[in-house]
Amino acid sequence: MGLSGQQRKQLQSALIDAFPTTASLEQMLAFGLDKNLRAIAGEGSLQDIIFKLIQVANAEGWVEDLVRAARDSNPGNPQLKAIAEGLPNSGAETPLSIPQKPTHQVQTILILAAIPKGLRLDTEISPLLSLSL
């Protein structure tokens, strides 16, 4: 999801409100996204650092993760909550994996192999055929 200029401005304001120090923003990124703020945005004022952070997240495609991590780190912030609710799938929890029901159906596996010239397939594969699975 790419953000418009207005959305980036709103996110910048929300992040400044939610994380009033560079250290608090740095901790949120490290704990929530395993990212290094200094490596992403360098030095500068909090406003400049957040601007660079949003630019990079937007360009690299992880801005949704940034918003969610910020909201999770500061769930009481109404600006972050409003921005997060505007994200796709904001209300839906996506399961990490869907459990599969065990099936007792016979499955057939096709194995294809190349036979080099001079190989005696009957002598090579016969020991395998005697194995039971």
Image (cartoon, grey):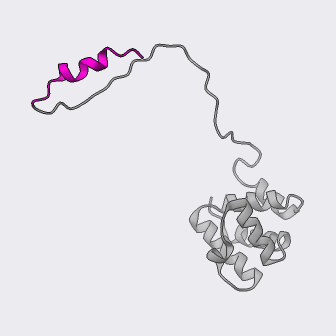
Is residue 44 at least partly visible in the picture? Answer: yes
Instruction: Tell me: 37 left or right of 119.
Output: right
Q: Which quadrant holds residue 128?
A: top left
85 over 132 or under it: above or below: below
Stretch of the chain drawn in magenta: 118-133
For the point 68% across and 58% down, the residue is 65
126 over 32 or under it: above or below: above
Instruction: Tell me: 14 left or right of 108.
Output: right
Please identify the quadrant where the C terminus is shown. Answer: top left
Q: Which quadrant holds residue 107?
A: top left
Indicate the position of residue 82 as horizontal and vertical percent values. 82, 58
For the point 66% across and 40% down, the residue is 96
Indicate the position of residue 121 as horizontal and vertical percent values. 18, 23
The residue closer to the viewer here, 85 or 77, is 77
Q: Give the residue at the far left of this rendering.
A: 118
The residue closer to the viewer here, 2 or 75, is 75
Q: Which quadrant holds residue 131?
A: top left
Is residue 82 at least partly visible in the picture? Answer: no
Indicate the position of residue 69 as horizontal and vertical percent values. 75, 59
Magenta stretch contains residue 120 = yes
Indicate the position of residue 2 as horizontal and vertical percent values. 62, 62
Magenta stretch contains residue 46 = no
Instruction: Tell me: 106 left or right of 129.
Output: right
